[in-house]
């Protein structure tokens, strides 16, 4: 199918098309709102949280425009064993690709809030990118049904690493950083909503094909609204009001802040 043909299919499926445009509109509003909310943030670390959060709707606009234009959607023939074997199934692979960019931003913002160290941040972000890329591989594999699920399994394994840092490591850090209350709220929101993605993948046309493509797309769009916009709004509102708490955390790497170790008074000897 050519891109124009895919575009026409999207145009004809009103429910699917609406799920894309609703998210484009929402991302536009979110960008303006988040710029406004962070306009007075001055501490470099708090600013980094703000920039990372702002990247989420920016990536989202690109992601949904790719889908709405038919650029990042393909019709793939499912292998034997799949419920729709031999049929061309609409695959929104652009979603998995853009999650590779948006989810690390969410985790960077959360990690900075929790007062993470560089090792944990690196671990969770690499595992998260690997989760998205292997999820993309699961969606694009057409040679073998078993291998589609094997990719899915690999992706879930990376997801477990993400969950471990989120649920075990960062709560301890957040306690020490005095950000436990807001961190725990955002952690629960994130964990609950992120679980929805592999569930809808498994139930949607790419997995067991229990749910129709447009329903799955709306499900992802709703999850996106909570995991991105509600998350980002709560985080930015807190950061704007509690900048000093973030500013007092030790730097992970040089942030340009005068409080960085090494820029203070040299020790007497
Ligand atoms: C896939 C399928 C393979 C198994 C797993 C998945 C997890 C996806 C997640 C996505 C989160 C996306 C967000 C996007 C916001 O922009 C790739 C669906 C584990 C957790 C939060």
Image (cartoon, helix red, strand yellow):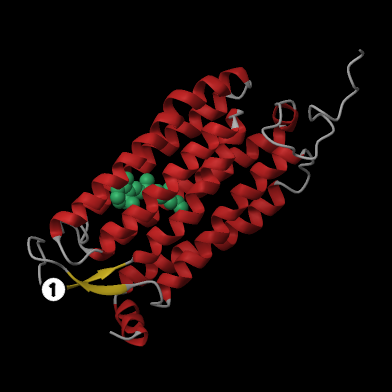
Residue 197 visible in image:
no
Label 1 neighbour load within 10 Å: few <14, some 14-19, many 20+: some
User: Badge 1 is on which residue?
Assistant: 87
The residue drawn where x is 11% and y is 61% is 82
Say if disc 1 is inside 8 Å of ligand 1. Answer: no
**SS for callout 1:** loop
> From the viewer's perspective, is residue 143 above or below residue 107?
below
> From the viewer's perspective, is residue 75 above or below residue 100?
below
Q: Nearer the viewer, residue 221 or 194?
A: 194
Indicate the quadrant where residue 98 lies. Answer: bottom left
The residue drawn where x is 45% and y is 64% is 22
Q: Residue 210: give x, y in percent of width and height.
A: 15, 56
Residue 34 visible in image:
yes
Q: Nearer the viewer, residue 78 or 6?
A: 78
Q: Residue 237: give x, y in percent of width and height.
A: 64, 39
Indicate the quadrant where residue 181 lies. Answer: top right
Q: Quadrant of the C terminus?
A: top right
The residue drawn where x is 51% and y is 47% is 104
Q: Residue 239: give x, y in percent of width and height.
A: 67, 36
Q: Residue 135: give x, y in percent of width and height.
A: 32, 54
Q: Residue furthest top?
A: 269
């Amino acid at each position: 199918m050519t891109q124009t043909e895919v575009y026409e299919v999207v145009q004809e499926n009103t429910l699917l098309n609406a799920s894309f445009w609703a998210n484009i509109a929402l991302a536009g509003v979110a960008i303006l709102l988040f710029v406004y909310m962070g306009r007075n943030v001055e501490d470099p670390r708090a600013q980094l949280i703000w920039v990372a959060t702002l990247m989420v709707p920016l990536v989202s606009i690109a992601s949904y425009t790719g889908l709405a234009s038919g650029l990042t959607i393909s019709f793939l023939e499912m292998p034997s064993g799949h419920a729709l074997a031999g049929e061309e199934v609409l695959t929104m692979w652009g979603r998995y690709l853009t999650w590779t960019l948006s989810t690390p931003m969410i985790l960077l913002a959360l990690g900075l809030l929790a007062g993470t160290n560089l090792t944990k941040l690196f671990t969770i972000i690499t595992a998260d990118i690997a989760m998205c890329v292997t999820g993309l591989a699961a969606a694009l594999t057409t040679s073998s049904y078993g291998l589609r699920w094997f990719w899915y399994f690999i992706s879930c394994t990376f997801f477990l690493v993400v969950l471990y840092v989120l649920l075990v490591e960062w709560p301890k850090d957040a306690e020490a950083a005095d950000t436990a209350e807001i961190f725990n709220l955002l952690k629960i929101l994130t964990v609950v909503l992120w679980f929805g993605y592999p569930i809808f993948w498994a139930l949607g046309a790419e997995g067991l094909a229990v749910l129709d493509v447009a329903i799955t797309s709306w499900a992802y769009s709703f999850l996106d609204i909570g995991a991105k916009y509600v998350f980002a709004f709560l985080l930015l509102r807190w950061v704007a009001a509690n900048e000093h708490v973030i500013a007092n955390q030790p730097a992970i790497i040089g942030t340009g802040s005068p409080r960085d170790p090494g820029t203070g008074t040299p020790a007497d000897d």
